[in-house]
Image (cartoon, rainbow, N blue to C red):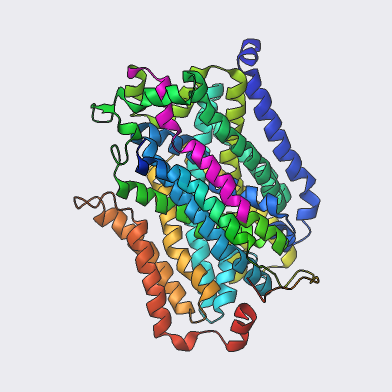
């Protein structure tokens, strides 16, 4: 035991401090958050811009970004940064086009969740159906995402601290559940802000590791600019790491860039951030700084794997090119500095837990407020209590799936993001900007977006040569937007009354 | 590194700068916050 602590003390100490800070924040906000639904679900729309900005960044970027995407560039080279470029563009689009308008309309409608926004905005006999349908999509699609995040974090604990996988998963999920259930949206946002600061710093530290190891930027680029390391097919990479499209097709980059990047304009865990911002000045701050936090972090992280070639021997590189999830762990062990490892590992936990907490709260609110309370209204005072119970049960379910993950969980996680973007974006954008958008247009686009994503993924994409690089997000998104436009135009008589639209559009 | 490989790196910096300039010139108000003396547009 003493030997174990001697070996891992910086990592154990920094991780323990981080977990205690998260729990402390949750405990601090416990009483305030339990005052009512608006407090627990939205932090009463009184959170400063810098907190929301960091929370958006830390919620969107996850351990998958810092481990999975960083590792991908070991295989695909520096061109992989194009994925980060697309993500940054969607971050700007999300804040410029959706943020202010969404904050404005949801306050007028007294909306507390994304599904209830659909109901209040489209205002018809069908709009409750849209609310329940969208809540069910959230409940189904998010579980795979949560399992993916918990799985990645548990693997880190196992490989770095020798903590058994199931215990690591249990610890991460339990701590996240505790502080989320105590402080609701208050603790989610404030812990997200702390996690965002850590993640930003860790991204910069991570990119410096290969540079310091090799002895400078120039030397590093000399090494990776022409390497004898082999690619997946066993051929020498040569100058492939620094040559555009040499190791990966641009269509593949585009697919991942869109499928993941578009989560920022469609996923409730990102969009709900707009609800809680306190005033217009804060909104402006967040609109400027969120793309900076995300963009700089992605600049550091997305090409990291390619730089790690400078630290690897040919044999190590031949192994890592087939196991890209291990690239970051390899980099830390090769650098062999316990303090740096401790800081980076704490940052990786932060990346995982920030996303996990946000999604956990979304799931609780979706089930209790948008399914249960919508079908059979309950006393307002019981909503927060049952939201906590739902989060606990869902956490157990996530733990079970994390310990016994179904096959293809990683693919399922990416697929769920595509379902969100295709099924939610037209209804959100149309709700905010198009007066002529109707409930029928919304429900038809949700169903068609979901169906096209499923059909393309399972019956088209991998069945026909040349289509495998075209991600399901592309056809599903285009068709669901067209369906929203066409069905809304065909059902003009279902446009909400003029008075309602005047309140929303002025 | 060729031009197309380097483009996303400086492209990210460029879009964050352009975004900052654009946002700083926007006027944003919400209906549920106290009004002050500054002239404001109706809505974002």
Q: Position of residue A92 (x, y in %)?
A: 53, 56
Residue A217 in view here: yes
For image coordinates 38% across by 24% down, the residue present is A222
In the depicted structure, whether residue A273 falls above or below residue A373:
above
Instruction: Report which quarter residue A381 is drawn in.
Output: bottom right
Which quarter of the rendering shows the C terminus of chain A? bottom right
In the depicted structure, whether residue A465 falls above or below residue A347:
below
Which quarter of the rendering shows the N terminus of chain A? top right
Q: Position of residue A96 (x, y in %)?
A: 56, 62
Residue A407 in view here: no
- Looking at the picture, tell me which residue is in the foreground, A39 or A51: A51
Q: Residue furthest top?
A: A3
In the rendered picture of this protein, how many numbered marks are placed on residues?
0
Q: Is residue A287 left or right of residue A240?
A: right
Q: Position of residue A396 (x, y in %)?
A: 57, 44
- Looking at the picture, tell me which residue is in the foreground, A453 or A347: A347
In the depicted structure, whether residue A411 falls above or below residue B20:
above
Q: Is residue A251 left or right of residue A147?
A: left
Instruction: Report which quarter residue A373 is drawn in.
Output: bottom right
Q: Residue furthest left?
A: A465
Q: Is residue A1 left or right of residue A314?
A: right
Residue A254 highlighted magenta (yes or no) = no
Specify the segment rendered in magenta. A288-314
Q: Is residue A83 left or right of residue A499?
A: left
Residue A311 highlighted magenta (yes or no) = yes
For image coordinates 48% across by 70% down, the residue present is A427
For image coordinates 53% across by 76% down, the residue present is A127
For image coordinates 24% across by 50% down, the residue present is A462
Q: Position of residue A355 (x, y in %)?
A: 57, 46
Tell me the chief SS of the magenta region. Answer: helix
């Amino acid at each position: 035991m003493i030997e174990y602590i001697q070996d891992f003390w910086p990592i154990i100490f920094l991780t323990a401090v981080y977990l205690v800070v998260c729990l402390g924040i949750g405990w601090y906000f416990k009483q305030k958050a339990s005052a009512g639904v608006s407090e627990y679900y939205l932090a009463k729309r009184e959170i400063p811009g810098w907190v929301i900005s960091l929370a958006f960044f830390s919620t969107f970027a996850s351990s998958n970004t810092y481990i999975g995407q960083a590792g991908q560039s070991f295989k695909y080279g520096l061109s992989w940064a194009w994925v980060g470029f697309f993500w940054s563009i969607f971050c700007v689009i999300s804040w410029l086009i959706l943020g202010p308008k969404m904050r404005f309309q949801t306050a007028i409608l007294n909306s507390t969740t994304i599904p209830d926004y659909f109901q209040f905005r489209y205002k018809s006999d069908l709009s409750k159906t849209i609310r329940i349908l969208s809540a069910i999509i959230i409940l189904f699609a998010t579980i795979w995402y949560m399992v993916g995040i918990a799985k990645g974090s548990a693997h880190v604990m196992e490989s770095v601290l020798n903590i058994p996988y199931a215990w690591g998963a249990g610890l991460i999920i339990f701590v996240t559940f505790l502080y989320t259930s105590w402080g609701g949206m208050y603790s989610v946002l404030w812990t997200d802000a702390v996690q965002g600061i850590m993640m930003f710093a860790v991204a910069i530290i991570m990119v410096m590791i290969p540079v310091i190891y090799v002895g400078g930027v120039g030397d590093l680029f000399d090494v990776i600019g022409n390497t004898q390391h082999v690619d997946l097919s066993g051929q020498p990479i040569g100058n492939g790491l620094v040559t555009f499209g040499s190791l990966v097709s641009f269509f593949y980059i585009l697919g991942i860039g869109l499928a993941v990047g578009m989560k920022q304009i469609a996923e409730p865990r990102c969009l709900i951030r707009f609800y809680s911002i306190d005033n217009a000045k804060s909104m402006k701050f967040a609109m400027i700084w969120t793309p900076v936090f995300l963009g700089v972090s992605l600049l550091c992280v997305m090409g990291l794997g390619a730089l790690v070639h400078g630290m690897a021997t040919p044999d190590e590189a031949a192994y890592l090119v087939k196991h890209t999830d291990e690239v970051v762990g390899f980099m830390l062990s090769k650098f062999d500095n316990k303090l740096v490892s401790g800081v980076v590992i704490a940052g990786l936990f932060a990346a995982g837990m920030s996303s996990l907490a946000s999604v956990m709260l979304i799931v609780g609110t979706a089930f209790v407020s948008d399914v249960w309370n919508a079908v059979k209204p309950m006393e307002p005072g019981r909503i927060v209590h049952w939201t906590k119970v739902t989060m606990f049960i869902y956490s157990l379910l996530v733990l079970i799936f994390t310990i016994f993950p179904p096959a293809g969980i990683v693919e399922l996680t990416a697929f769920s993001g595509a379902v969100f973007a295709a099924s939610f974006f037209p209804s959100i954008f149309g709700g905010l900007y198009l007066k002529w958008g109707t409930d029928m247009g919304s429900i038809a686009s949700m169903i068609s977006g979901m169906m096209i994503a499923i059909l393309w993924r399972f019956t088209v994409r991998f069945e026909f040569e040349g289509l495998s690089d075209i991600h399901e997000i592309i056809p599903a998104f285009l068709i669901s937007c067209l369906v929203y436009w066409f069905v809304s135009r065909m059902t003009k008589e279902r446009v909400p009354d003029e008075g309602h639209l005047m309140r929303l559009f002025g | 590194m060729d031009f197309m490989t380097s483009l996303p790196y400086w492209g990210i910096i460029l879009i964050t700068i352009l975004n900052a300039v654009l946002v700083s010139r926007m006027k944003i108000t919400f209906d549920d916050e106290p009004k002050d003396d500054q002239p404001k547009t109706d809505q974002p």
